[in-house]
Image (spheres, grey):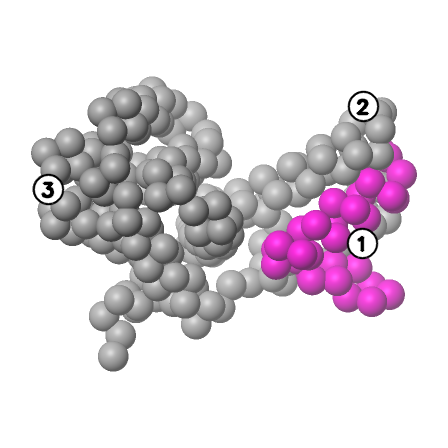
Amino acid sequence: MKKGSDESLKSMVYKSMYEDIMLGKYLPGMTFSEKDLVEIYQISKSPIREALIELCNEGMLRSIPRFGYEVLEISQSELRDVKETRAILELGALNICFDKISSEDISHLRKVIENAHNEGEKSVLLHWNRNIQFHLELATLAGNEYLIKQLQSTLTLMGRAYSQYQSKKHNKTTFKSGESHNHANLIDAIEKKDKEKALEILARDLDSFELLYIPNPLTLS
């Protein structure tokens, strides 16, 4: 890795580690030390430690005193809660902002879909990030910054959960690629001012994120 300021090196290590965890290179339960990463990245401990602290704060790793770091697994109960929270946040945001969505907003959302479609399956992580971008752009129309921060957190965790599942099942990470059809139908409903239909499509799109071993939290009694 190229030399640079501690802050820029920390950012590069963070990005590399984040992507490796998301793509299943580092599986849940795997452990490593700062020394291991110093050898991999060929830089000092300081920026590596800062990157690891940030990943710990985000719940991707846990620090084991005098040993190193462990990649955390997302439990079924945690994912149920996160799925349910995501539905509450996104459906609530659309309900709040629906009547204020402008033609310019609709054009922008269609552009986001177009960009995602053009990327195809070149990059699993890029594909997932494009999907996240659409949902965040839509929720942003509600004008609630705190809601967006919470939604970003839930989407990151769900991406990790899906990565974990696919890595265990297929020994590789692949994300579903059918979201753009739901997104296009959702925008059509918004453009037609059909709020009930739009909320129904969004709920169905959110529910399509399904790990086979996770019951649908919206149907739990």
Query: How would you rate the neighbour count of disc 3 (Cα within 10 Å): few for under 14, some for 14-19, many for 20 or more?
Result: few
Quadrant where the C terminus sits is bottom left
> Where is mark 2, residue-wise?
2
From which residue to which does the magenta span run? 41-70
Q: What element does badge 3 sit on? A: loop
- Residue 194: which numbered mark, if any? 3
Q: Mark 1 packing: few (<14 Cα in 10 Å), some, or many (20+)?
A: some
Residue in the picture at 44% in, 51% down: 147
Tag of residue 118: none
Where residue 142 appears, as percent x and y from the top left, is 35, 43
- Rendered location of residue 1, percent (x, y): 78, 27
Q: Residue at x 46, y 68 (%)?
A: 78
Q: What's under tag 3, amino acid-wise?
A: Asp
What amino acid is at disc 1? Ser
**Label 3 to label 2, Cα distance in Å?**
53 Å
**Do the residues bearing badges 3 and 2 touch, measured as CB atoms within 8 Å?**
no
**Nearer the camera: disc 1 or disc 2:** 2
Task: Kindly identify which residue carries mark 1.
Answer: 33
Q: Is residue 65 magenta?
A: yes
Can you see residue 185?
no
Vertical comparison of 96 with 126: above or below: below
Along the line of sight, the residue nearer the viewer: 8 or 69: 8
Secondary structure at numbered mark 1: loop
> In this view of the protein, which residue sits in the foreground, 91 or 11?
91
